[in-house]
Each structure stands twice: as structure tokens, then as C-alpha cells.
Amino acid sequence: MLSGMPPESAATSPTSPKSPPLPPPRNPSGPYRVLCVCLGNICRSPMAEVVLRAQLAAAGLQDRVIVDSAGTGDWHVGQTMNPPARRQLERRGYDGSAHRARQVDAPWLAERDLILAMDGSNLANLRALAQEDGRRDDLPRIRLFGEVAGLDGADVPDPWGGSTTEFAEVLTMLETGMARIVSQLRAVVGAAATER
Ligand code: 4NP
């Protein structure tokens, strides 16, 4: 069962002026793997997945970085994306039709290079999951999207049941933040390529 966690340490505080660099690839000769995580995996994290994948393709990095998403909760497993989330994506030219919701499984944490939590509660739940499963080594790879993306550690607000405007704001936040994350990913996978 996922449970709460104490607040983050000062080293990873979302208010830290400087965000630590992205975790290095586990396998420098393979693709870098990013998992986006929210609560239900029907709104924020699938939107984040679609946006990041599109930006990676635009940057020519689609074979070097692989993206997926999951939720900490199991209520929506197997469902398609929440219709307002999908509509909002479509309005800006993305396709969210292939998505089916999944719940994050502890072993996945050891298979991803970077796990991006959409809000502080998702972060706490993921960290608890890693610790309960004896995966302390994976903790530095679990990061808050708003911290990595240079958004002052802001949570991506939960838009479930919210207005069209709220979904649009979430999408804008994801587009802005992912552009910054793609720049960091380019540096990480570029460095890994030269080490091969
Ligand atoms: P998401 O939104 O975490 O962005 O996918 C939610 C979806 C479902 C629920 C909460 C948030 N829910 O409580 O079922």
C-alpha cells in the first residue's frame, strides 16, 4: 500500500535555487528511460508523456529517450485518457488516443533513469514505494517535475473534474517545463553517446 512520507530533504527541496543535474543513464549504451507519474494516470502524467514524446521527436531524440507514464493509484487502470485532457491535447495538435492507464509497480523504479512526479504528493508516494520495496538506490532518480523543469518546484495542479481552463493551464505548464527537460536530456544522452 502506498503511504505518505516525510517532507523532502533539504538537498532535494523544490525551493532549492539550483536543481541537481539529471540522473546519469543506468545503461549508457541503451535509451534513457523517463516515467511520468501522477495519481490516476488519466490526466497529468499521460499529458506529460505525450508532450515530452512530441518534443523529443522534434529534437530528433525519439530513439535516445523513451517515455511512459503511470499513476500511483489503481482506480483507472486500463482506461483511456480523461476526455478533457485528451481534447486539450488535440486542440494543440497532439494525439492522446493510444493511452491506457496503468498503476506504477515498484520494480519499474529500477528500470527507469528518471521518474518525474507531477506533484509533491505523487513524489512522496513514489518515495515511500521505493523505500518499502528496499529500493533506496532509486530515490535520487525520483524527482519533482516542477523542480527539474525549473518551475520553482511548483506542483502540476490536479485538473481532474476541473474546467477547460485548468486543463489548458496544465498543458501549458507541461509544454514549458518539458522544453527545459528536453534540453537537459539532450546533454545527458549526448554525454552517454560519447562514452560508448
Ligand atoms: P491525474 O488526475 O492524477 O492527473 O490522472 C486524477 C485522476 C483521477 C483521480 C484523481 C486525480 N481520482 O481520484 O480518481
Image (cartoon, rainbow, N blue to C red):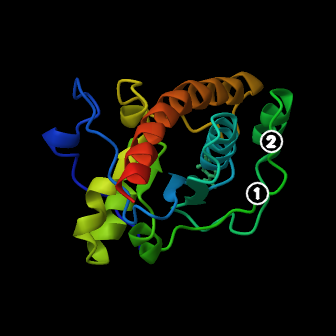
Q: Say if residue 43 shows up in the picture.
A: yes
The local secondary structure at tag 2 comes to helix
Q: Say left or right for 151 vs 7.
A: right
Rendered location of residue 82, percent (x, y): 77, 48
Could one spot residue 122 in this view of the protein?
no
The circle drawn on residue 4 is: none
Residue 2 quadrant = bottom left
Q: Is residue 118 left or right of residue 70?
A: left
Write down the quadrant of residue 111 in the picture. Answer: bottom left
Location of the C terminus (image quadrant): bottom left
Q: Looking at the picture, which amino acid does disc 2 mark?
A: Arg
Which residue carries the number 2 mark? 86
35 lies above or below 178: below
Give whichever of discs 2 and 1 has the lower sequence position: 2
Mark 1, residue position: 99
- Total marks shown come to 2
- Judging depth in this view, the residue of 149 and 42 nearest the camera is 149
Mark 1, secondary structure of its residue: loop
Circle 2 crowding by C-alpha within 10 Å: few under 14, some 14–19, many from 20: many
Q: Residues within 10 Å of mark 1 (few under 14, many from 20)?
A: many
Residue plotted at (80% across, 42% down): 86
Residue that sits furthest to the left in the current view = 10
Q: Residue at x 82, y 57 (%)?
A: 98
Question: Pointers 2 and 1 in contact (CB under 8 A)?
Answer: yes
95 w.r.t. 122: above or below:
above
Mark 2–mark 1 Cα distance, whole angstroms, equals 9 Å
Screen quadrant of the N terminus: bottom left
Q: Quadrant of residue 99?
A: bottom right
Q: Estimate the x, y position of residue 106 in percent, counting from the top left.
A: 43, 74
Look at the numbered disc 2 and say if its residue's Cβ is closer than 8 Å to ligand 1.
no
Q: Amino acid at mark 1?
A: His
Q: Position of residue 18 (x, y in %)?
A: 24, 27
